Image: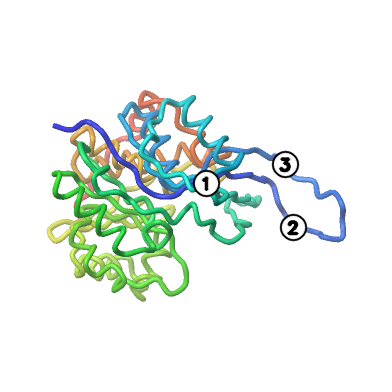
Amino acid sequence: MPDKVICVGFCCVDVCIRGVAQIDFSRELIPVKETSIWIGGDAVNEAYVLNKLGNKVELIIGLGNDPTADFIRMVLDAAGVDYSKSVTNPDSPSMLSVPLIREDAERSFFNASRPESLSYRVDPEKIRGARVVSLASLYFPPFDDVDNALAVARAAKENGAIVCADMMYSEGCRLETYRDLWPYIDYFFPNQEEARGLTGEEDPDRMAERILSFGAANVIIKIGKRGCLARNRDTRMIVPPFLVEAVDTTGAGDNFAAGFIAGLMEGQDLYHCCRYANAAASIAVRHIGASTGIKSREQLQEVLDSEKEVSHAL
């Protein structure tokens, strides 16, 4: 059986600014609690965390030709993440993002326009030999191109892989955009706000039902302090979170996806995959940066062992 995960999506460098109460642009110097720089982007975060959890990972991203890309390569090389199938655009910069982390640990982002390096074509021949293939963000480059997303999902299924997908919501996202794609998706991980925007529904169960009606096999909706709601055609469950005091929520959803995929790689059932996901997210939000919290599989296990399992089928 294949023993690797292929993560496909976008990359960036995050310049994190923590402790922003308000910004007074009349001042030359605006004090904050902390600043840091680290790799970011959905696929990068997933791959980096999965690697720390002991999984063999291949990462496919679009890189520019600039110091930002050099920094991404340096960090991935040091971590031992294989990004050899990635695509470099010599005429484009890479993406740089500035998350402003507020005192409540939530964040806003300063971003310039999307560089061309994000909009690369994925060669379906590269989607081979994986147990799990992750389309790390639908509705965002490179998967704002529906044909690109379909090519990856079809290649994954032809090779017997499990297909997971997350998303990045923007105004105007619709389920219908990926009408042909949803039947290829085994696990979909929107948060509650994203699922609301996609479906127009207010109740998470109704959101999940609507997405399932388009052909996705399993929908796992992140519902904040309640944990996550997991639905398929036969099962409904709410899996409670591991409650912690959050410092930075940047990348929490990507860590959630990585934790869930780690469960799949270990052959866990839906409930235990959700517990892995919640545990990974709880570690992530206690640290500054999108992928700096998780250090090892043993660390994840300590969190899993910290709370008793509960009855989950509802």
Q: Amino acid at mark 1?
A: Pro
- Reading the image, the residue beneath label 3 is 33
Query: Could you tell me residue 241's position as x and y percent?
Result: 38, 46
Q: Secondary structure at mark 1?
A: loop
- 245 vs 25: above or below: above
Left or right for 249, reference 59: right
Indicate which disc, 3 or 2, sits on the residue closer to the N terminus.
Answer: 2
Residue at numbered disc 1: 90
Amino acid carrying label 2: it is Gln
**Along the polypeptide, which appears first: circle 1 or circle 3?**
3
User: Residue tagged by mark 2?
Assistant: 22
The quadrant the N terminus occupies is top left
User: Which circle, 1 or 3, is nearer the viewer?
Assistant: 1
Q: Residues within 10 Å of mark 1 (few under 14, many from 20)?
A: few
Around disc 2, counting alpha carbons within 10 Å, would you say few (fewer than 14), some (14 to 19), or many (20 or more)? Answer: few
Q: Quarter-wise, where is residue 61 in the image?
A: top left
Where does the C terminus fall, quadrant-wise?
bottom left
Residue 105 appears left or right of 149:
right
Which of discs 1 and 2 lies nearer the camera? The answer is 1
CB within 8 Å, label 1 to label 3: no
User: x, y percentage for residue 245?
Assistant: 54, 42
> Residue at point 39% right, 55% down?
137
Report the residue that reaches farthest toward the front. Answer: 91
* Front one among 17 and 8: 8
What's the residue at 25%, 33% (across, down)? 4
Question: Considering only order in the chain, which callout, 2 or 1, is on the residue closer to the N terminus?
Answer: 2
